[in-house]
Image: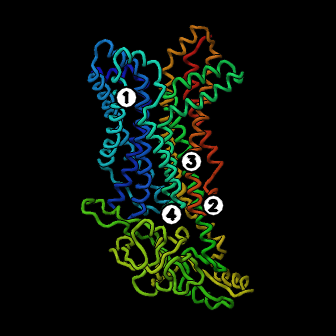
Amino acid sequence: MRVALRSLLVVNRAAVLGAGIVVALAAMLLGITTAWLEAGVRHPELPFLSSVAGSFAGTLLLITVFMVANVFAGVLRERRREFALLRAVGATAAQIRGTVRTEVLLLLALVAPLGAVVGTFAAASVTPLLRASDIVPAGFTLTASVVPLLTTLVVLVPTGLLAAAMAARAATRPSPTDAVRASTTDVPTLSTGRRIAAGVTALAGLGIAATPFFTPGLVGSAAGATSAIVLVVAAALAGPLLVQWAARRGLAVARRGVGGAASVLALLNARGASRRLSAAVVPLALLVALGTVQTGTDAAVDRATADQLVAGLPADLVVTSSGGVTADQLERIAAVPGVRATTTMRDRAGSVQVEQPDEDLGGLGGLEWEPTVVRGLSADTRSVDPDVRSGSLAALDAPGTVAVSNDLVALTPTGLGDTVQLRSGDSPATSARVVAAYDRGLAFGDVLVRDRSAGPVDTLLVDARPGDRAAVREALLALDLRVTTADGYAASVLRSGDGERRLSLVLVIALLAFVAAAAGSTLLTAMRGRRGEFGLLQRTGATRAQLLRMAGVETAFTAVAAVVIGTVAVVPALVGVGQGLAGAPSSGFDVGAWAGFSGAAVVVAVLGVLPGVARTVRGR
């Protein structure tokens, strides 16, 4: 134990510091997310909290496991020579594996609990964003518990131990002599199993990206968006081969006199140290892919929502009021000369059961319910067109009936004539028979019912006689009401979601900051492991300027490779998302966002390499 502590805190403290920061950030994000998810389970009347936390938790879990394992693998890879020398002087493979396992457990024990506790209390500071997004009510507070800490340890400890076991196995598998010889070079080839895994993962990613073409709508598009991460994982498996291929192509150009000797030396290093370099390229590629697919998906959702609202509201005018349109105002509007028909819409938060109850879930039974907006329509529905594909909205006149979106149909084993369970707030669940299914779920929500409630309505759709629209508009404005067109109403609906977009932006920035920190840590660790290489080059005549130029070329190679891999990984996902949501493959592309995330990857690559190299090669 004392030897392991000395290794962590003294001998390898620089590399361990970077890994510790990554583990702490991962633990903090896991703590925040688990605190939200636990609160959602404790409060089933807040289904949107469980939905938001669960959605983010799935992505966070995948990214956390991937990045933490990559960072541990990078730190331990740079210690191959140390492990080889230990074996050469008599240490057994079991002793080295035990040492590595103990060091990883000590690091996790020192850092992970602290990060989880900070995350648990930091979750409360984000509650105002949840309130602004109408996910939780005013006055809602999070209750601290040990669940985030336990969850964090359950995720990070197996991840760290698995990375340690794989690194220790690679270090102890060769004979001591071969291990010393191989400790200064990368293995130039990949195993057959890893090649096959890379190919299968890439094919799976492309198949997932095509999901929206067969399952249009939000559900298919959400699945298609995950293909970007799957394709980055495929790139990670094939990373050394991709780096070698790119370096060879670059060398063919550099040897024709382009870039000079520094470029040739840098590309030779990239080709010879492809494993080390791919470990830095892949996190940066993930930064580009994850940020681009998230912003692209948000843009496609906004466009599809606006298109569906404009197409689904054939009414001439849309009327709203800060306190709702009252019954008296409805009567006065109906009596306005030129008004041909009106349709009212009233929204309330609710949830629908998407899975059958499972006794083994216990207190997690609230996860069986999907939050949604239940929209009530008046009897005259001539001013709305949710694009009904089966059944009829007229059947909503019968008590205990609902119409559901095809997104909900894709999410649940529900069809025309089936029964669904609905609930609103603290009210008990009620059964309703499905009498219609429609396509425009982004515009009208997942559930439509006949509005039988009293009180002010949220929105009134007015259909005017030909030629009377302007006169009707003036009459409605005289009643001190807000009057707009379908286009204006669509724009206001999108503006009302600004709180949700801010929350989504904060979550994405936090996740990308974690990825950037992990990528930076990997680059710094790799650079520190090359001090001997730079010293040898200086002793054999290389000048400081030459080494800095070489490092600059390597940095550019790393950044360009990351941007290219991230872009290639994200394009299939965005094509599928755009097609599934808006029917236009290009609607998910946000070139400005892509450029911003690509620039961030370049900045991380530069800061992770050049300052350290400049300090290392001081002198000539």
The quadrant of the picture occupied by the C terminus is top right
Alpha carbon distance from label 2 to label 3: 16 Å
> What residue occupies the far front of the structure in this picture?
192
The disc labelled 1 sits on which kind of residue?
Ala
- Along the line of sight, the residue nearer the viewer: 425 or 296: 296
| Among numbered discs 1 and 3, the one appearing first in the sequence | 1
Q: Which secondary structure, mark 4?
A: loop
Label 1: how many Cα within 10 Å (few below 14, some 14–19, many 20+)? many
Q: Residue at x 48, y 31 (%)?
A: 521
Residue pointed to by mark 1: 167
Residue pointed to by mark 2: 584
Image quadrant assignment for residue 62 = top left
Query: Is disc 3 in contact with disc 4, using a CB cutoff of under 8 Å?
Result: no
- 376 in relation to 16, above or below: below
Q: Which secondary structure, mark 2?
A: loop
Alpha carbon distance from label 1 to label 3: 30 Å
The disc labelled 2 sits on which kind of residue?
Ala
Alpha carbon distance from label 3 to label 4: 19 Å
Residue pointed to by mark 4: 215
Is residue 238 visible from the viewing direction of this image? yes
| Among numbered discs 2 and 3, the one appearing first in the sequence | 3
The disc labelled 3 sits on which kind of residue?
Val
Alpha carbon distance from label 4 to label 1: 41 Å
| Mark identifier at residue 570 | 3
Is residue 510 visible from the viewing direction of this image? no
